Image (tube, helix red, strand yellow):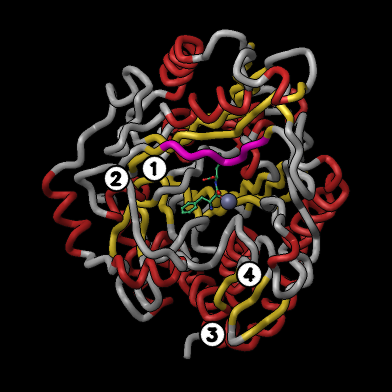
């Protein structure tokens, strides 16, 4: 066994207990009530980097801090920017967790906690992959730059400002110079399935909105006023149901203008993956799947745009019945976009269309919460080949190439501002429940991810930047 493999074997229990320590910190970024916990999680991570003697800084932002750490440059070898996030989604609904979200618990080889897979567990694999090199060889074969943010789950305000240069004077240098690299590595997605690792080459984008409708000055008796006064809850339902036709096509004018159709070759690649709809339905507890007509489940999830309502409110929610005509109604909703769709264009068209279809007697307010375009990364690079070899070693099986329906907004920013590609190396499983109750991470995947990471530094270290 190589000294690195031996080191990793010897540290398994400690890697797990470190991850558990971090998972106990409730770093929910979207809710200000959790601010101290978010800060604790940032400090914990910075302490780990310092412990490895990496040059570490905590960069305060208008939102949550960014944790940045780097190892020394390695002449001739690539510089690798590792991106991840230490923030997590809210744990709600709390009563659906078998064990509490911030009390990490192992059951049947799976570690249950909010953030286990998304993204604390996956992110830490790269820190431990680096640790194995530093502790056994005293140095890394590539320069690593870790850029770990605390607002990925709520729009990356601080990171976007950082990348736009807002903190350059505080940093004493341009942020883009600080993080300059040859390739980005992100583990914040999933494998294709159990026993089948994957490299993700496409992500969807997103546009997220809140729609607020206001009718009469205050709630009214629905008998005395109903039928003559526009009910904002009725108006909301009418408007939201106009978003898609019966074939699942989004009705916002111009919505599909910039959508790149799937090529026959890519459709074939998807179909070669032999996705099992029946097993998928059984895993989710549903009796049927629906979506845009003419597309398979993988096409719908990975490469077609969607509309989903994420939250909905109005009227009486308490026990019993109340005959009320509510004065207000609202919804949170989002589109997933495919690469080449422009969130700004979508936002303009959406607002104009909503104003057109809004029934009389209703005031409409549309809040643009956040947005990001989708991305496709090149498959034919030496970096991609290196990732394939590293994963084959760590997982004992070569990866397949997949797209994914989730969004990692910064991937597009890295391509635009640094002109570099990203390796999306997901160690999770589709049923790891990110953003849902009982989020988990298979401990075997955690350790295979660490082994793959340690191999990745090796493989990337063998590339000469002068010949790429
Ligand atoms: N890890 C996910 C992204 C992801 C999920 C990629 C599944 C591939 C497969 C990430 O943390 C995430 O949830 N991103 C948000 C971004 C949004 C808040 C801008 C998402 O996709 O909802
Ligand atoms: Zn997430």
Do the residues under discs 3 and 4 have CB atoms within 8 angstroms? no
Which residue in the rendered view is the most extreme toward the left? Answer: 264
* Residue name at image x 60 percent, y 70 percent: 440
Which residue in the rendered view is the most extreme toward the bottom? Answer: 1
Within the image, what quadrant is residue 31 found in?
A: top right
Tell which circle, 2 or 3, labels the residue nearer the N-terminal end: 3
Residue corresponding to mark 1 = 421
Q: Residues within 10 Å of mark 1 (few under 14, many from 20)?
A: many
Do the residues under discs 2 and 1 have CB atoms within 8 angstroms? yes
Residue 260, placed above or below residue 92 = above
Q: Residues within 10 Å of mark 2 (few under 14, many from 20)?
A: few
For numbered disc 2, what is the local secondary structure?
loop
Residue 155, placed above or below residue 186 = above
Tell which circle, 1 or 3, labels the residue nearer the N-terminal end: 3
* Residue name at image x 57 percent, y 41 percent: 310
Tell which circle, 2 or 1, labels the residue nearer the N-terminal end: 2
Label 2 or label 3, whichever lies nearer to me, is: 2
Residue corresponding to mark 4 = 131
Residue 408, label in figure: none
For numbered disc 4, what is the local secondary structure?
helix
Label 2 or label 4, whichever lies nearer to me, is: 2
Alpha carbon distance from label 1 to label 4: 25 Å
Q: Is residue 219 left or right of residue 393?
A: right
**Which span is picked out in magenta?**
307-313
Residue corresponding to mark 3 = 3
For numbered disc 1, what is the local secondary structure?
loop
> Is residue 52 something one can see in this rendering?
yes
Q: Residues within 10 Å of mark 4 (few under 14, many from 20)?
A: many
Residue 378, label in figure: 2
């Amino acid at each position: 066994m190589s000294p690195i493999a031996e080191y990793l074997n010897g540290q398994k229990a400690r890697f797990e207990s470190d991850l558990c320590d971090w998972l106990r910190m409730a770093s929910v970024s979207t809710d200000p009530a959790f601010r101290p916990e978010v800060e604790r999680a940032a400090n914990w991570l910075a302490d780990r980097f310092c412990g490895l003697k990496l040059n570490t800084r905590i960069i305060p932002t208008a939102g949550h801090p960014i944790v940045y750490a780097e190892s020394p440059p390695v002449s001739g070898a690539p510089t690798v920017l590792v991106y991840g996030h230490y923030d997590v989604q809210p744990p709600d609904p709390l009563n659906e967790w078998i064990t509490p979200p911030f009390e990490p618990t192992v059951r049947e080889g799976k570690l249950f906690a909010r953030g286990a897979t998304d993204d604390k567990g996956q992110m830490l694999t790269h820190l431990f992959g680096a640790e194995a090199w530093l502790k056994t060889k005293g140095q890394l074969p590539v320069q690593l730059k870790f850029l770990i943010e605390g607002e990925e789950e709520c729009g990356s305000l601080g990171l976007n400002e950082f990348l736009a240069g807002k903190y350059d004077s505080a940093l004493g240098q341009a942020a883009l110079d600080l993080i300059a690299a040859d390739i980005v590595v992100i583990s914040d997605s999933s494998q294709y399935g159990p026993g089948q690792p994957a490299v993700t080459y496409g992500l969807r984008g997103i546009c997220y909105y809140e729609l607020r409708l206001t009718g009469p000055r205050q709630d009214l008796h629905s008998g005395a006023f109903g039928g003559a006064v526009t009910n904002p809850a009725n108006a909301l339902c009418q408007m939201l149901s106009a978003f898609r036709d019966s074939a699942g096509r989004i009705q916002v004018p111009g919505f599909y203008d910039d959508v790149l159709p799937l090529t026959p070759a890519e459709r074939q690649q998807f179909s070669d993956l032999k996705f099992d709809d029946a097993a998928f339905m059984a895993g989710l507890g549903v009796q049927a799947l629906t979506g845009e007509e003419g597309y398979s489940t993988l096409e719908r999830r990975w490469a077609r745009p969607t509309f989903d309502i994420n939250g909905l409110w109005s009227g009486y929610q308490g026990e019993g019945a109340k005959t009320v005509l509510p004065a207000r109604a609202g919804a949170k909703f989002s589109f997933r976009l495919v690469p080449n769709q422009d969130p700004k264009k979508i936002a303009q068209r959406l607002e104009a269309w909503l104003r057109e279809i809004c029934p009389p007697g209703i005031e409409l307010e549309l809040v643009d919460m956040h947005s990001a375009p989708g991305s496709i990364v090149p498959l034919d690079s030496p970096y991609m080949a290196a990732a394939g070899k590293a994963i084959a070693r760590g997982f004992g099986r070569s990866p397949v190439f997949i797209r994914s329906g989730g969004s990692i907004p910064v991937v597009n920013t890295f391509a635009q501002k640094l002109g570099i590609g990203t390796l999306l190396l997901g160690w999770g499983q589709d049923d790891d429940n990110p953003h849902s109750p009982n989020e988990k991470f298979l401990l075997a995947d955690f350790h295979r991810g660490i082994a793959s990471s340690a191999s990745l530094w090796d493989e990337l270290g063998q590339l000469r930047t002068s010949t790429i």
